[in-house]
Image: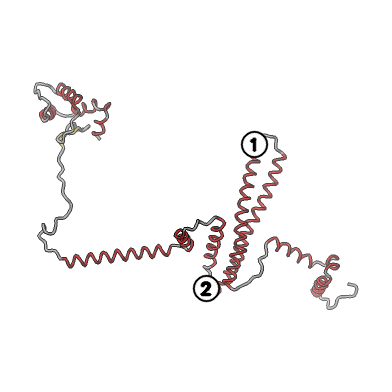
Amino acid sequence: MLEKLIDNEQAKIKPYRSTLEARTLKDLQEAVGSTKDMKLDKRLKKSKLIDYMMQYFEENGYPTNKDWKPDPTMGLSEVKEEVKIDPRPLHPILQNEKRDFRKEEEEELARNLEEKRKTEEYVARKSEQITVEQLDAIARAFQGQPKPTYDEAFPAKLIATCMTLVNLFDDGEDVIIQAKLGDQICRMFEKMRDNCVTAADKLKAELRTETRADLGTEINQNKIDDLEEKIARLRNQWLILNNAFAVCVNHLRPKVLGQTGINFGKYTTLQEMANLNKKKASNQRLTIANLVNDRENFDYHLHHRHEEIGLVEIPDGL
């Protein structure tokens, strides 16, 4: 602490004078007497002796000898020389001990075998953590092949991740769960994609309303900018989800169905399913349009309709 204090030129005089004043006259006289270039005058009183010492320090520098050091609380104090002890053990020859070279050789061999075992365990543990994608990347690096683009890497990573989920259910009766997952993962991305379209349509309607009501003020412009930004984010989400949906339908689903041996037929989208349900409901109605366009289907539903109410034969005229 005091060494930093002494190095500060502006803080040298006053603190060091206070340090000297904290000592007795006898201590100051001993300090002056122990310095070669200083002359001790025992007739000087304490204040005069301190003035003489300060003048000497200002001209020749402050004391850095090992016998005396400045202390802001105690003044000059003696520095005890620390005796350094070598912690290293003595050589066996100096200890007059007889060395057992066979024992030392066995201990060294045991240490080497233990280090080898730990190294092998570490390498095996790290090898298990390396994925197939990482091995492919290492192989490409050795072969000098370029890093795959996003369009190449994303489908491969998505399929591998989804197959990890599918392969969690690979025991006995769980094979039907694997087959259903092949469909439901596709359905999940399709619903998320369609939800983006629904949300974007609502925002577009709000944007049209704000645009019509725009008065050229900053508040209106901020609302319009905010809506356009949300629509742009939804557009990007739609692109990502549509890409994931296409990858799952065209690659993941056939792979899962081929692995399980279960075939659910062609994948039906939500829009196609809605059209089929609408057509099915329409065909079940006994309308003139169905009678004219599809008499066979009309007669089928008519027959079942009358069976429900207990009619055995269809009356004439119907």
Q: Quadrant of the C terminus?
A: bottom right
Q: Quadrant of residue 179?
A: bottom right
Element assignment for label 1: helix
Q: Quadrant of residue 249?
A: bottom right
Residue at (70%, 37%) from the top-left corner?
214
Q: Indicate the position of residue 219 as horizontal and vertical percent values.
A: 64, 36
- Where does label 2 land, which residue? 171
Q: Indicate the position of residue 162 as horizontal and vertical percent values.
A: 55, 63
208 up-or-down from 183: above or below? above
286 up-or-down from 26: above or below? below
Residues 15 and 57: in front is 57
Question: Horizontally, is 80 left or right of 288 in the view?
Answer: left
Residues 94 and 166: in front is 94
Name the outermost residue toward the right. 317
Query: CB of mark 1 within 8 Å of CB of mark 2?
Result: no
Query: Label 1 vs label 2: CA separation?
Result: 60 Å
Residue at (9%, 60%) from the top-left corner?
96
Q: Which mark is residue 219?
A: 1
Q: Quadrant of the N terminus?
A: top left
111 up-or-down from 200: above or below? below
Question: Horizontally, is 37 left or right of 173 in the view?
Answer: left
Question: Horizontally, is 143 left or right of 105 in the view?
Answer: right
